[in-house]
Image (cartoon, helix red, strand yellow):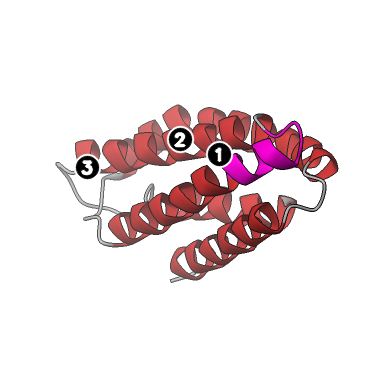
């Protein structure tokens, strides 16, 4: 699970928060807020896993979050550039939030993996999440 989250967090710090332009801060901020929300929602879904039945319910949420992460990544890729000072401001705002969310997801993922009782739907949702993370990683490398 850690391999899934790291590409997401790295993408966020590289792609939507860099560049040199002006007047586009709010667009970047909106994408950053959406990414933080998606990561926290992912942590919530993972933390809800207590057994096989709750893992099955979490799988539905994780699939939806995977789709949201892909969408946010595409929106981030299309963002106009920001100035250096705007970039610094965005990093100062979102880096701590994303680190906190990533740590939360990482801890919740370990717990969920231990409690999911091998639920096939849950495991498939994690695979889908991993694929979304790989897509984000590719976008962040451009």
For the stretch drawn in magenta, what is the main secondary structure? Answer: helix
Which residue is more in the foreground, 21 or 49?
49
Q: CA distance from mark 3 to mark 2?
A: 14 Å
Q: CA distance from mark 1 to mark 2?
A: 10 Å
Q: Are marks 3 and 2 in contact (CB under 8 Å)?
A: no
Residue 90 place in picture, x, y as percent: 38, 35
Q: Nearer the viewer, mark 3 or mark 2?
A: 2
Residue 137 place in picture, x, y as percent: 53, 64
Residue drawn at x 45%, y 39% is 38
- Marks 3 and 2, the one that precedes in the sequence: 3
Q: What residue sits right under mark 1 in the picture? A: 42
Q: What residue sits right under mark 3 in the picture? A: 27
Start and end of the magenta stretch?
Answer: 49-58
Q: Which quadrant holds the C terminus?
A: bottom left
Q: Is residue 28 left or right of residue 129?
A: left
Q: Classify 47 as above or below 64.
A: above
Q: What residue sits right under mark 2 in the picture? A: 36
Which residue is more in the foreground, 140 or 62?
62
Q: Is residue 21 left or right of residue 41?
A: left
* Residue sticking out furthest to the left: 23
Inspect this view and state whether residue 15 appears: no
């Amino acid at each position: 699970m850690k391999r899934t989250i790291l590409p997401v967090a790295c993408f966020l710090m590289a792609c939507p928060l860099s560049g040199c332009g002006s007047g586009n801060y709010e667009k970047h901020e909106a994408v950053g807020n959406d990414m933080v929300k998606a990561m926290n929602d992912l942590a919530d879904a993972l933390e809800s896993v207590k057994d096989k039945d709750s893992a099955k319910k979490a799988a539905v949420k994780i699939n939806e979050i995977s789709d949201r992460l892909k969408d946010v990544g595409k929106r981030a890729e299309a963002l106009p550039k920001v100035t250096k000072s705007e970039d610094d401001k965005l990093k100062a705002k979102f880096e701590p939030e994303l680190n906190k969310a990533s740590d939360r997801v990482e801890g919740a993922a370990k717990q969920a993996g231990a409690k999911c009782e091998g639920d096939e739907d849950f495991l498939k949702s994690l695979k889908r999440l991993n694929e979304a993370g790989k897509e984000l990683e590719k976008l962040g490398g451009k």
